[in-house]
């Protein structure tokens, strides 16, 4: 229904001017990622996203994945698109070249992934889960496991899944009950039911490599007794060919609010004698391996937030330019396109400014990830890793919460047509709804943020980040013009709000964890809004320098105007959020459960 | 799926202590509405809502209304429920006794309507539209039209529809093209297509009375050339029996995001020679009649906001008490119900406090409506009408926007289960999505608020309301305890925010209508939040007086704690919204359309 045109101009601006692709390309092993190569990758990815994946987005939603006789059939066109996707090598963009990947930086793959997610979120989940499984095997698998699975997975011939959740074990993986029984030959038989398994079955690839959390006999209770197993749909023979069908079946799929084309499976392992698998890494260390991957998965879900918001924005903008309805509020002879109505304009600016802020925040975190992994200086690696660790829950939580607000606005701009499924506007809102839930709800992210990432280290990293933000504020103060005065004041107040709220968290987390935790999500949103505003301010400074150097590209004044809007309409909410964090804890827990 | 228990305790508290049911019962014609009678009406309505309508909510959503051969079939159980509903006399609760209604105040019908909407929003739209048509005929119809239609409509034997929208005429009714050709015998033949017609066809009643906007030949262009016609599905013979099938057919229904059981029809009038109708009231005055009804319809949609939020709250609360997952954040031996987790508690408190604020605001506006209609003192009627006129767009806009946020939280509390349709949590969010769109989008409401309701009268009414709010603030200052200090400060800041924003609107609407209009929706939300906070503060004062009088009902301390939460988490957003209104206009319109 709606077209998707990757926002290449803004992507390239963020990559070059804010995230420092040039510096990333100087890191050992990333020398190939020259700006020119990156440009051509983005352009090709954009063609594939807009030309192949986007046209299947709405039809995939309407048809949905279907299930029959323990097997999932994908909607029309998905298998062919996936084959094209794999054959073009897109699956292995960021993977180890030793196993057939292209070894490009996370910064580049972040921009490319945004395109997959924006053009067809349901499709994009299949390679996303495969990447997660690749990463787990790459980090923790044996040489034999790596050579057995990685080349075909990186090539996209086989896909991967993550089997964590069980009915009684959602956010709390300590409650996992699936069992792994050693067979004495190095293999295990796996028994148990897993739910919410994305792409647990489908017909797009030859094999599916399930990574499964389960307990060995006599394993300790709780999270310290969970091991990780690799359980392929088809066993793999010694020569690499496919062997017998394993005892791992999709026994039903969920009827969901969104991402209808992405099969969400109930997986039964071992109902017919036991599913054969091998252990990945050390016994009882499964959760640790999962947590290592978790940052990547959470970052990727955060990207879904900006991706869906961008798609919804493009969809709504096209409608707003085309739909003629009502006179201009200041008077007009004839009816005008609704894009001229101030409230429509406000909603479009809200979407545009937040999309740009989210993208800038996500990509700069991706660049920090690359530096944390590859920088030759250990202190730089540590500094970047601390920033990434702090920001992952914000990228995951804030981008996804914001995408729910913005896809909502996309429907609103469509008026009555937005409520009619045929328009496709509602799909973006439905698809976005899962993003604040899976890979850890916003509440889980926020608890991680205030606990592990702030209180535990006495706020060291966030204080350093606040220092960097203050430097940007000082640069804003040097600029001429009313717009920069507005941006400077708003960012300054935002930083103060973050600072006060962070101080409160550090001071009180130890003695009143419940009250502080009531403010966890408000704090996560506050930090997201201000960190996004910081990146927008950096963008406005770059734009100002370009204008001062006589660059006539209208992109630059637009970036400044967009940042100013963000200051007035988004950063202005910071103080209220800080108030909820600092003062809202006691009231949050005041009522007895019986009083609800 | 989920049960619905009407919140009778809070409803009765608001009716008695905040909305003054005793004073409404002193108005001429409302003498029967004694507190005891009202209590028994609410109790009976609650039984019907919880016992008959609520069980059909999810099944109706899953099955949906279906269309075949120009006729709509309702989901299983709807026809029987509607028959029961009509036979019990619920349809005519607020209608003129002269035509068989019960003539009860709007304040009472508001509480009862909340129950229909909460228990089964899709069902409730049928009587809602019928009431709208009844009101239009009652206000503007001829004696013959009234005697022909009103008794059967009030009895619920016939239902009604409102046919306004056409493909090119949504928010802008000036663009209506449907034609009405006089036949020389007092009747007209109607030709044209209408879209988004709620319950345009169904199988629950014997006849459907369509009210249709159309143009007579040579009518002036624009809104001044629109007349209103009554066009029944079956013509009515002189003896009141049903005659020939009229040329008004449902030619398709929409596939929508929500309210699946409510058929949204494309209606074709006159495709087979002309649909026969008669004119209601004066020629070319159709829009005026619609606008008279509009306040009632907008108020009713606002009620949908609190109703759906209440249902979502009950649904989420039940799940939060039942779902065991994770340890208490402050430590616990075993896993606990998620209601104990601070972020879940915050979301439940957000829902509870806003629901109570929305209900209090809506019911007090309903009471003002009754006083505006019936008070013996003309000055009181005028004062109340001005308050109602000011607050209708707020009730419509703020309650519905808030319900979208709160039904979203209802899904969030369910975690992954919220995304699975089987749970039913997502239905509330899907159903709520239409409420900010139909009967005028939030943008339309907000433009009405800042233009006709504030700027045009120089802010006279809102200044009077601000004066009343300040009185409540002064009363808060008299109360002991930290909670009241918090509430007083937050309400005071909120009132200041409203006051500053209103002053800005009054001062600038005439000279920069575009910039002021960028802030229209932020202002509407601001006024809603503060007006809701004002009612919560009044509630807390009543509760405090009860406690001081040694009343041990735990409802009262809970009301104070809930108000305090609202102060910290909701009123705290007021200053940010005022900032967007006062400072955000220029930035909102700064970008050329071409720059998007």
Image (cartoon, coloured by chain):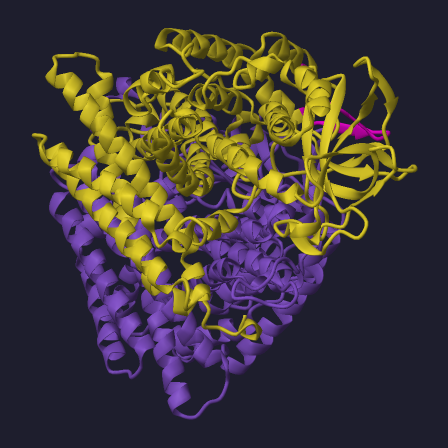
Chain colours: A yellow, B purple
Against A464, residue A554 (above or below) is above
Q: Position of residue A369 (x, y in %)?
A: 42, 30
Q: Quadrant of residue B274?
A: top right
Q: Position of residue A407 (x, y in %)?
A: 46, 34
Number of residue marks: 0
Is A64 magenta? The answer is: yes
Q: Quadrant of the N terminus of chain B?
A: bottom right
Q: Quadrant of residue A488?
A: top left
Is B379 magenta? The answer is: no
Residue B29 seen from this side? no
Against B323, residue A269 (above or below) is above
The magenta stretch is: A63-77
In this rendering, position of residue A104 left or right of residue B381: right
Q: Quadrant of residue A485?
A: top left
The residue positioned farthest toward the bottom in the image shown? B550
Residue A119 seen from this side? yes
Closer-to-camera residue (B31/A354)? A354
Closer-to-camera residue (A269/B88)? A269
Against B135, residue A410 (above or below) is above
């Amino acid at each position: 229904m709606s077209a998707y045109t990757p926002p290449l101009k803004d992507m390239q601006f963020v990559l070059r001017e804010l995230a420092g692709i040039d510096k990333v390309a100087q890191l050992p092993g990333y020398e190939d990622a020259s700006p020119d190569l990156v440009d051509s990758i983005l352009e090709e990815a954009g063609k594939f996203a807009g030309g192949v994946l986007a046209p299947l987005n709405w039809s995939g939603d309407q048809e949905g994945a279907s299930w029959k006789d323990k097997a999932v059939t994908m909607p029309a066109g998905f298998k062919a698109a996936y084959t094209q996707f794999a054959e073009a090598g897109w699956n292995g963009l960021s993977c180890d070249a030793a196993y057939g990947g292209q070894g490009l930086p996370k910064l580049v793959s972040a921009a490319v992934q945004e395109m997959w997610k924006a053009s067809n979120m349901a499709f994009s989940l299949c390679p996303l889960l495969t990447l997660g499984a690749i990463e787990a095997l790459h980090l923790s698998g044996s040489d034999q496991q790596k050579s057995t699975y990685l080349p075909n997975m990186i090539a996209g011939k086989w896909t991967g899944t993550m089997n964590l959740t069980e009915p009684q074990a959602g956010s709390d993986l300590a409650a996992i009950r699936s069992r792994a029984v050693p067979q004495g030959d190095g293999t295990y038989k796996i028994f148990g039911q897993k739910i919410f398994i994305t792409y647990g079955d489908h017909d797009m690839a030859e094999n599916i490599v399930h990574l499964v959390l389960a307990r060995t006999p006599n394993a300790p209770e709780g999270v310290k007794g969970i091991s990780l197993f690799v359980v392929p749909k088809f066993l793999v023979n010694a020569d690499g060919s496919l062997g017998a069908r394993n005892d791992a079946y999709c026994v039903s799929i969920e009827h969901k609010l969104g991402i209808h084309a992405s099969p969400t499976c109930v997986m039964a392992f071992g109902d017919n004698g036991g599913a054969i698998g091998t252990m990945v890494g050390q016994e009882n260390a499964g959760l640790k391996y999962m947590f290592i991957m978790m940052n990547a998965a959470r970052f990727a879900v955060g990207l879904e937030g900006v991706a869906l918001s961008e798609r919804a924005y493009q969809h709504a903008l096209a409608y707003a330019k085309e739909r003629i309805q009502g006179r201009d509020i200041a008077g007009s002879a004839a009816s005008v396109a609704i894009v001229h109505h101030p409230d429509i304009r406000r909603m479009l600016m809200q979407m545009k400014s937040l999309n740009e802020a989210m993208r800038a925040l996500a990509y700069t975190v991706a660049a920090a990830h690359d530096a944390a992994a590859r920088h030759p200086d250990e202190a730089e690696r540590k500094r970047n890793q601390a920033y990434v660790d702090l920001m992952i829950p914000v990228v995951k939580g804030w981008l996804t919460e914001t995408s729910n607000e913005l896809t909502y606005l996309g429907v609103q701009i469509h008026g009555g047509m937005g409520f009619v499924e045929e328009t496709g506007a509602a799909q973006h809102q439905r698809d976005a709804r899962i993003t604040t839930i899976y890979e850890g709800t916003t509440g889980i992210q926020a608890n991680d943020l205030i606990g592990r990432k702030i209180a535990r280290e006495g706020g060291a990293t966030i204080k350093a980040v606040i220092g960097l933000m203050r430097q940007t504020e000082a640069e804003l103060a040097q600029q001429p013009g009313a717009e920069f005065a507005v941006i400077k004041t708003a960012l300054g107040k935002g930083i103060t709000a973050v600072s006060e709220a962070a101080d409160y968290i550090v001071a009180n987390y130890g003695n009143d964890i419940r009250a502080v935790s009531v403010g966890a999500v408000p704090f996560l949103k506050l930090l997201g809004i201000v960190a996004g505003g910081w990146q927008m301010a950096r963008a406005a400074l770059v734009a100002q320098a370009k204008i001062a150097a006589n660059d006539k590209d209208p992109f630059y004044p637009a970036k400044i105007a967009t940042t100013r809007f963000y200051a007035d309409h988004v950063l202005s909410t910071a103080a209220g959020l800080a108030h909820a964090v600092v003062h809202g804890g006691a009231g949050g827990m005041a009522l007895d459960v019986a009083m609800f």
